[in-house]
């Protein structure tokens, strides 16, 4: 996607309503001025079938509001993560938040195991594929640019 790609208001919902999962990654990579966080917030509301937010917009008439997908939101934007232990603690915190939101409890002791269990359990519980939205994924890297280890 070309640099400088801009979307506003109803154009966002027009685009979102016509996306399939395979195109989402390419679109996110090309977003410059819209802001990935806002875009991910909008995606989350669509996938969670929050229909009142889209009244009067293109997506309202072109989205299947009868299907609600479980959404796992992971944002690494808050705080500093200076080492692996802090990154793992942040990941575990995000997993705990998502477990509470989805009404699921993980039995796996490790964060990666819990993440896999959360995805599988959410799909089983809600009968739909799970949407995973990751924001500020580059923050732990940026926090450690001066520390090569």
Image (spheres, helix red, strand yellow):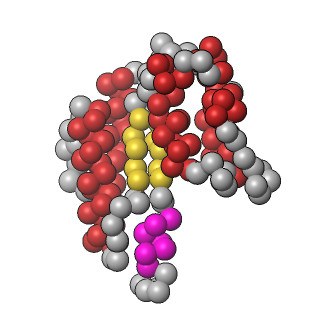
Instruction: Give the image location of residue 2, x and y in percent.
Output: 80, 53
Does the magenta-highlighted stretch encompass residue 10? no
Given residues 59 and 108, the one toward you in this image is: 59
The residue at 29%/33% (across/down) is 102
The residue at 41%/35% (across/down) is 71
Q: Does the magenta stretch mainly form a helix, a strand or a loop?
A: helix
Q: Is residue 15 visible?
A: no
Whether residue 16 is situated above or below residue 68 in the rendered picture: below
* Residue 25 as seen in the image, left or right of residue 100: right
Query: Which range of residues does the magenta coloring cover?
Result: 138-144
Given residues 13 and 115, the one toward you in this image is: 13
* Residue 125 as seen in the image, left or right of residue 138: left
Residue 54 is drawn in which quadrant? top right
Q: Is residue 134 visible?
A: yes
Instruction: Give the image location of residue 84, x and y in percent.
Output: 33, 73
* Residue 80 as seen in the image, left or right of residue 16: left
Quadrant the C terminus occupies: bottom left
């Amino acid at each position: 996607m070309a640099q400088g790609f801009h979307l506003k208001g109803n154009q966002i919902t027009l685009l979102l309503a016509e996306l399939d999962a395979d195109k989402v990654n390419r679109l996110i990579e090309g977003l410059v001025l819209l802001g990935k966080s806002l875009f991910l917030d909008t995606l989350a509301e669509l996938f969670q079938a929050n229909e009142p937010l889209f009244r009067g917009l293109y997506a309202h008439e072109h989205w299947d509001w009868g299907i609600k997908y479980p959404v796992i939101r992971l944002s690494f934007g808050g705080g500093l993560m200076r080492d692996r232990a802090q990154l793992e603690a942040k990941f575990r915190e995000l997993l705990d938040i998502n477990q509470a939101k989805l009404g699921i409890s993980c039995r796996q002791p490790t964060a990666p195991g819990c993440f896999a269990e959360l995805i599988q359990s959410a799909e089983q519980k809600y009968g739909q594929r799970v949407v995973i939205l990751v924001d500020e994924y580059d923050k732990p890297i940026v926090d450690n640019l001066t520390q090569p280890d």
